Image (cartoon, coloured by chain):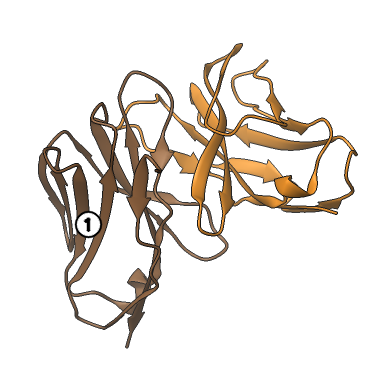
Amino acid sequence: EAQVTQNPRYLITVTGKKLTVTCSQNMNHEYMSWYRQDPGLGLRQIYYSMNVEVTDKGDVPEGYKVSRKEKRNFPLILESPSPNQTSLYFCASSQRSSYNSPLHFGNGTRLTVT
Amino acid sequence: QKEVEQDPGPLSVPEGAIVSLNCTYSNSAFQYFMWYRQYSRKGPELLMYTYSSGNKEDGRFTAQVDKSSKYISLFIRDSQPSDSATYLCAMNNGNTGKLIFGQGTTLQVKP
């Protein structure tokens, strides 16, 4: 089954403790992206990757890191999480970044930083 | 001012009603316009996409883009309870991988 898999689905952590949220897609997609979703703010793009070894900042990249060493994986790294990074995170992928290449989203990771 | 504005609602309508969802935007470089639907506890899924101005119809759904007014709409005819979800507009200028989403409008269709 074609899908984007995020892990974990739920994560509670403390301020400053490094964490990684994994994202994997099995559709051989070139484009992958991370978003955070907050009430009243909608989906905001954190980072995106047009292809392997190519990453770029979205609108809210501060406090996050990503890497794209393999086509299928695009982990999101929080080196020193803070409470303002408490949010619902989505990973997405598409064949290309153009309009007619639909984004496939994972089911989300709900992160709480205390 | 946000690049894309969308009324968060909630919008509540009776079954069978015509629903109109709208977004305005400020960046004239946007050329690609999408509507995503998000059910509770799920990731968004693409519903419709259009390029530049004009209309596009798919079953009960019609997407409209008016670039001169920087205004896009999604119409749902004969709305069903299964249409109850959050609808997000999204836009892209076609030159980068940046996709800008609206805040999303929560729709409830009552039987």
The chain in orange: A
Give me the residue at 26% from left, 26% from top. Answer: B29
How far across and down, in percent of the image, does residue A101 sit?
35, 32
Above or below B110: residue B4: above
For the residue pair A66 and A15, the one nearer the viewer reads as: A15
Color used for chain B? brown
Q: Is residue B63 left or right of residue A31?
A: left
How far across and down, in percent of the image, does residue A44 sit?
52, 41
Point out the image quarter for the N terminus of chain B: top left
Badge 1 element: strand
How far across and down, in percent of the image, does residue B55 sit?
10, 46
Above or below B77: residue A18: above
Mark 1, other Cα within 10 Å: few <14 / some 14–19 / many ≥20 = many
For the residue pair B45 and B11, the one nearer the viewer reads as: B11
Q: Name the residue under label 1.
A: B74
Residue B54 occupies quadrant: top left
For the residue pair A80 and A68, the one nearer the viewer reads as: A80
Query: Residue lying farthest front?
Result: B1
Visible in this render: residue B89? no
Residue A81 occupies quadrant: top right
